[in-house]
Image (cartoon, coloured by chain):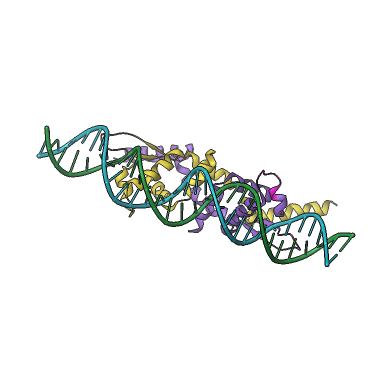
Chain colours: A purple, B yellow, C cyan, D green
Amino acid sequence: MDQLSATFAALADPTRRAILARLTEGPATVKELSEPFDISGPAISKHLRVLEKAGLITRGREAQWRPCQLDATPLKEVAVWAENYRRFWDASYTRLDALLTEMKEKER
Amino acid sequence: MDQLSATFAALADPTRRAILARLTEGPATVKELSEPFDISGPAISKHLRVLEKAGLITRGREAQWRPCQLDATPLKEVAVWAENYRRFWDASYTRLDALLTEMKEKER
DNA sequence: AGGTTAGATAACCAAGTGGTTAGGTACGAG
DNA sequence: CTCGTACCTAACCACTTGGTTATCTAACCT
C-alpha cells in the first residue's frame, strides 16, 4: 500500500481522527487516549498501530508508558492532494474558468 | 458512516483516486473510465458506487451510457480538515509558534 | 517476593472490501 | 426481430477491519 492510500485509510475512522485531534494538545499515553472512548484497550492499540504505520504518530518509551506524539507530515500530502481539486469546488476559480472561456470566445 | 469518513474511505483506493483524476478532464462513460485499468467491469462499477455514495461523482443517463461527472465538494471538507493541522507540519508556523513562546517568555 | 498498572499479543468473530464469473436489462444498429 | 454494446446485479471468494476476551510482559510500589 502506498503512503497516500495508507494515510487516507487511517483517516477514514472517526476514532482515529479523534485520537489525532487529542494529540494536537500534546503527547499522551495509551491510557489517556483510550479514556474518551467506550472501547477496549486492544482496540485502541490496533488504532494506534494503524496510525503509526501511516506515519501519523510516533511512540516513545518511558518506564511502563508508551507515549504517543503527533506527526502531521503525511497530512501535508493530503492537503496538497486535495488542493489540486480546489478549482472544482471553489466559486472564484469557477468564475476564473468562465472568464477564460469568455476570452477565448472573443478571440475567435 | 459520516460524510468525512466516507470521503476518506473512498480516497483510500488508488484506482478510485485515478478515476477522480480522469474526471477532472471532463465527464466519461463507465467504459472509458475502465479502459486504463486491468480489472473487470463490475469491479469498476463497485468503485463508482463507492464514489457516488461519498458524493464525489454524479451519474447521468444517456441512452445506454451512464456518464460520470466529478463533484469535488466533499474534497473541500478534506482540505479544510487537513488545513487544521498545517501548523504541525509547516515550518513557518513552527517559527511563529517559537516567536509567540519567546514573546511570552519576555513578558514574565 | 507479591500485587498493581500500562500495554501488547493472540485467537476469535462479524462485517466489509476488492476482486471474480455468470447472467440480466436496456438501448441502438442492421 | 435479432445482434452487439454498455452497464448492472447476484453470488461467490480471499482478505482486511474493527471489535471482543484472555493471556502475556514489563515496570513500578510496597
Where is residue B28? Give x, y as percent.
Answer: 32, 43
Q: Residue at x 83, y 51 (%)?
A: B107
Does residue B87 sit above or below B67 in this rendering?
below
Inspect this view and state whether residue A6 appears: yes
Q: Residue at x 46, y 43 (%)?
A: A87
Inspect this view and state whether residue B87 appears: no
Quadrant of the snapshot with the C terminus of chain A = top left
Nearest the eye: A107 or B30:
B30
Quarter location, residue A69: bottom right
Nearest the eye: A13 or B94:
A13
Q: Main secondary structure of the magenta part?
A: loop
- Left or right? Give the position of A107 relative to A83: left
Where is residue A37? Give x, y as percent.
Answer: 67, 44
Residues rendered magenta in the picture: A33-38
Quarter location, residue D23: bottom right
Give the number of marks. Answer: 0
Q: Residue at x 28, y 38 (%)?
A: B65
Q: Residue at x 52, y 51 (%)?
A: A9
Where is residue B8? Give x, y as percent.
Answer: 51, 46
Q: Is residue A35 magenta?
A: yes
- Left or right? Give the position of D4 relative to A29: left
Does residue C29 sit above or below A61 in this rendering?
above
